[in-house]
Image: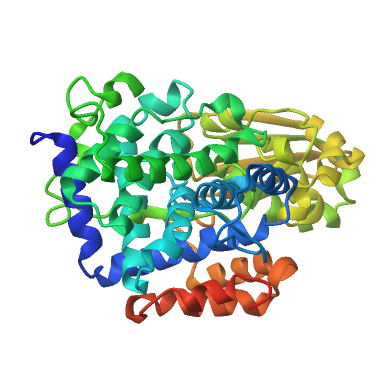
Amino acid sequence: MPASTTAAFCGAMLEAAARPLSRSVARAARRSLTNVLAAAVGAARSPAVAVLLAAADEAGGTGDVTVPGLARTLDPYWGALAIGTAAHLDDFDDTHLATVIHPGASALATVLSLVPEAAPTGAAFLGAFAAGCEAQLRIGCAISPAHYDHGWHITGTCGVFGAAVAAAVLLGLDAEAAARALSLAATMTAGHREGFGSMTKPLHAGKAAANGVLAARLAGAGLDGPADPLGRDGVLEVLASTVDSGALGLTWPESHHWELERNTFKTYPCGVVAHPSMDAAIAASARVVELGGHQEITGITAHCNPLVPELMGLDQPEDGLRSRFSARHGIAVALLYGRAGLAEFSDAAATAAEVALLRSLITLAPDPGVARDAARLRITLRGPAPAIEAAVEHTRGSAARPLTDADLLGKARGLFGPVLGEQAAVLARDAIDRLPGTKDTSELLAAIRPELA
């Protein structure tokens, strides 16, 4: 392949993965890995994953790939598909706020699916994960916001590029072969926002990982595709009406920051744009109880960023998956229970009469002047009781108010707990912290398998 934007991009990514990560980037990578691994473990027993496991059985997909939270193992294809789907299923994974990409799911699925054959050192595993996340984010920055605004699910469409890069790292491809992998991956992008609220949405992340690994394998065998998919007249111009090629950072990493350092972690298992209003609702919940309880509420107005009704405008979701895309549901359960975890986004919570009634009282008031990580809630009650107001300037988990390492471990313990036990979360966190100096990934794998944990 001749010198091209794609080749230069791949060369930079491979070089970055091969170098020791800087202290700040390594910390960002470890935090992202801890968070997304916990999300995958938490969804290991979900109906969606069960469907994939049954399909894998029919297809003869048994292999040596560890699936977080499960005793059984799969082959690389079905492993990548199942892990990526589980990691994104509950919408509890990481979020890069500038692009709304959840990069960890497909990157995790890619690197875990290749462990048996690549046998990477801990440093190589972490470097491939970091480069896989970064590739997605750089390409996402180049096509944002036009791509997402047009209806694409950017986690799926950009995820395949990151997966191809991560796979190229672990399979030992050079820059030329990695560029071919991206050329092939460019023909495998998938995902649109119509799938939000269904099992299809998390499948986009799983499919991105499986497709990215396939692209890298085929490229390594000599198959090629379009000459320069990231360059002029390439796939990026198909995916977005405007493309910022400078965001690809071809001089990276010397003169570019890592977008991975801007990755954030959710406090609630739902669309991140609703989190500020939910923070406000939790803050107001105790006051509502003091004034007679939620039955006294006559109306709730959420002043929020316009993305809230656009992405999470569902009025009355029919089940737990759909409730993750209803800001009204998030606000309602936060007010009712003073919390909003996985239980509050279950089928039972979504269909509860008291939740449905409270959702019906909520008005979303979009305001372009309200930042994405801010919100203001006004709750009116019967009788003479004064209205309750609660404002959030920066939601928990945002770039301006990030989760601490202790917060992140607490979240991981809550997700690991029902599946492997809370102590497994500590073991996994410790294993991830030690990856830069380990000869393999055995300690990490032991922490996420039931028979070993």
- The correct choice, above or below, for 134 with respect to 193 in the image is below
Q: Nearer the viewer, residue 434 or 336?
A: 434
| Quadrant hosting residue 62 | bottom right
Q: Which residue occupies 66% across, 59% down?
A: 42
Q: Is residue 44 left or right of residue 77?
A: right
Q: Is residue 333 left or right of residue 237?
A: right
* Camera sees residue 387: no
- The correct choice, above or below, for 19 with respect to 423 in the image is above
Q: Percent from the top left, x then y, of residue 411?
A: 61, 66
Q: Quadrant of the N terminus?
A: top left
Q: How is the image coloured?
A: rainbow
Q: Which residue occupies 51% across, 47% down?
A: 77
Q: Nearer the viewer, residue 366 or 328?
A: 328
| Quadrant hosting residue 348 | top right
Q: Percent from the top left, x then y, of residue 399?
A: 42, 54
* Camera sees residue 188: yes
Q: Which residue occupies 67% across, 54% down?
A: 43
- The correct choice, above or below, for 313 with respect to 257 in the image is above
Q: Percent from the top left, x then y, of residue 426?
A: 57, 78
Q: Percent from the top left, x then y, of residue 90?
A: 64, 48
Q: Quadrant of the C terminus?
A: bottom right
- The correct choice, above or below, for 11 with respect to 130 in the image is above
Q: Which residue occupies 70% across, 54% down?
A: 282
